[in-house]
Amino acid sequence: MAEVKLTAEMRTEFGKGAARRIRRAHKVPAVLYGHGTDPIHITLPGHETQLALRASNALLDVDVDGRSQLALPKQVQRDPIKGFIEHVDLLIVRRGEKVTVDVAVHVEGEAAPDTLVVTDRNTVSIEAEATRIPEAITVSVEGATAGTQFLAGDLKLPDGATLVDDPELLVVGVSNAPTAEEIEADLAEAEAEVGIEPTLAETDEESSEDGEGGESADGSESSDQGDSES
């Protein structure tokens, strides 16, 4: 993963009020820590940081007063509605050292016809060099038949990386695709559980399937003969 360079400013104001003022200036409050150093409170450029952190495990080269610090995002706080970054915790790393990170699982390919591919885990935990963290780990389901399972131990990891998760952990599974009848039955069961009654159209359809006889709209029984003889 390529390094992203960001120029930071030292931060001397703290608290919610100071953080709001920083964000109004289109910047992001952040903290650098790790390797036994005291936490370094900094301010990052908002737009550049937003772009850099679109990728998980983005490797940042942060310039603080002319000194370069290599760091990984440890925790990113975002506004739950607007999505902008409110605060970032950055973990200082060194070139050549290994770190434990969660890496996204990317599924590609087409499984066998009439099958359903289910991703059981969206990420897996690996240990890798800080400067060689993969953006994603690819699982190919091309031609996979129902019953095929891809476990964590089956994944192809980049050179130098090792799996931290249990090798027997299910990551992706392939099963038989449900039939239309099964889908309809599952939907009806789910609606019944939440108390959804059948619609009027469904009730009318069921009534029409009971037979040609029955009551007329005014409640009287239907008859093949008229009310009076001619």
Image: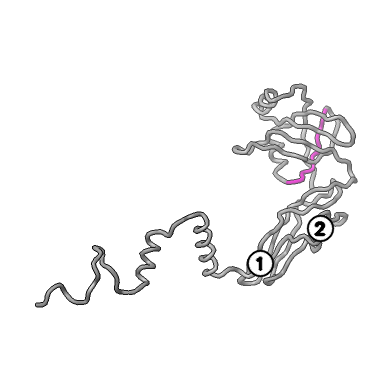
Image quadrant assignment for residue 59:
top right
Which span is picked out in magenta? 56-64
Q: 169 or 11, which is in the foreground?
A: 169
Indicate left or right for 199 with 91 as reference: left
Residue 173 part of the magenta-drawn span: no
Q: Secondary structure at mark 1?
A: loop
Image quadrant assignment for residue 25:
top right
Q: 187 or 67, which is in the foreground?
A: 187
Quarter placement of the C terminus? bottom left
Dominant SS type (magenta): strand
Marks 1/2: CA–CA distance: 27 Å
Residue to which mark 1 is pinned:
110
Residue 185: percent from the left, percent from the top?
52, 66
- From this view, report whether residue 116 is shown above or below residue 133: below
Residue 69: percent from the left, percent from the top?
84, 35
Disc assigned to residue 166: 2
Residue 85: percent from the left, percent from the top?
68, 36
Residue type, label 2? Asp
